[in-house]
Amino acid sequence: MTDLATRARTLLDLHTAPEILVLTNVWDVVSAQVVAATEGVRALATASHGIAATFGYEDGENIPLDLHLDMVGRIAAAVDLPLSMDMEAGYGDAGETARRAVEKGVVGGNLEDQMKPLDDAVAAVEAVVRAGRDAGIDFVLNARTDAFLRAEAGADRSELLAEAVRRGRAFLEAGAPVVFVPGVVAREEIEALVEGLGRGKLTVISVPGRSLPARELQDLGVARVSTGPFTQRVALTALQDAVVEMVGGGVLPPGTRALN
């Protein structure tokens, strides 16, 4: 467990470093190996959407947990970098899911609150933190609040910000080192979240064509930016574009590299 403890501490330190942590989400062994071999990459994270899609499931805990964990374990075994797992909402038992993830070599993870009653959401955070402690590691929980994702159309954004901060503070007090707020891309809203949660406590997702560059997020005090399902979509876009070129009478992209 010493190696896992070292990886966990490394991952935690990356979240508190002055430089923003950029996590490119991966979905299988080869994507993880390609990302891990890229200069500047310091840690990896899985995306539940990408892993589920790989096996033909819709996101949202539709993929069986055993299958999900099997893929995550294969990824962890194939790379030497700290790995964070998207645990979705914990599959009904966040602490047990975290315990099993650690057994697979995982040292951090996302956990959705799905806007459940705050006491229940805090209890789930505490269970994950406790599972890491029981395993002898500083499990890096990226506690996610869905205040924006589950909001009704036209909801007051200032009220959503206040709720995200309220929940995020509760998660931080329960032991999560960082809080993930998807659905936020505007500079002023990110500034408000950083002010409410503290510098180095907020993590966000990069949305193609909408999000601020990582260097600007760093200047705003964001701890981490990840890519969620979008990296798999980047790969699939390149695949489809190549197919279109081929069936149209062309050739494969000349710049294609032998990455596997």
Image (spheres, grey):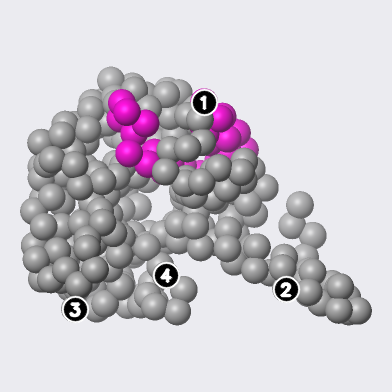
Residue segment shown in magenta: 66-94
Q: Position of residue 127 (x, y in %)?
A: 23, 28
Is 59 on the left-hand or right-hand side of 36?
A: left
Q: Are marks 2 and 1 in contact (CB under 8 Å)?
A: no
Q: Are marks 3 and 4 in contact (CB under 8 Å)?
A: no
Q: Residue at x 16, y 68 (%)?
A: 155
SS type, badge 1 = helix
SS type, badge 2 = helix
Is label 2 or label 3 in front?
2
- Structural distance between the alpha carbons of marks 3 and 1: 41 Å
The residue under label 3 is which amino acid type? Answer: Glu
Q: Position of residue 211 (x, y in %)?
A: 37, 75
N-terminal of the pair, mark 2 or mark 3, is 3
N-terminal of the pair, mark 4 or mark 2, is 4
The residue under label 4 is which amino acid type? Answer: Val
SS type, badge 4 = loop
Find disc 4 in the rendering and name its residue. Answer: 207
36 is higher (above) or lower (below) than 127 = below
- Structural distance between the alpha carbons of marks 4 and 1: 30 Å
Q: Position of residue 48 (x, y in %)?
A: 47, 45
Is 167 on the left-hand or right-hand side of 136?
A: left
Q: Residue at x 79, y 60 (%)?
A: 258
The residue nearer to you, when weighing 63 against 138, is 63
Find disc 3 in the rendering and name its residue. Answer: 188
Disc marking residue 66:
1
The residue under label 2 is which amino acid type? Answer: Asp
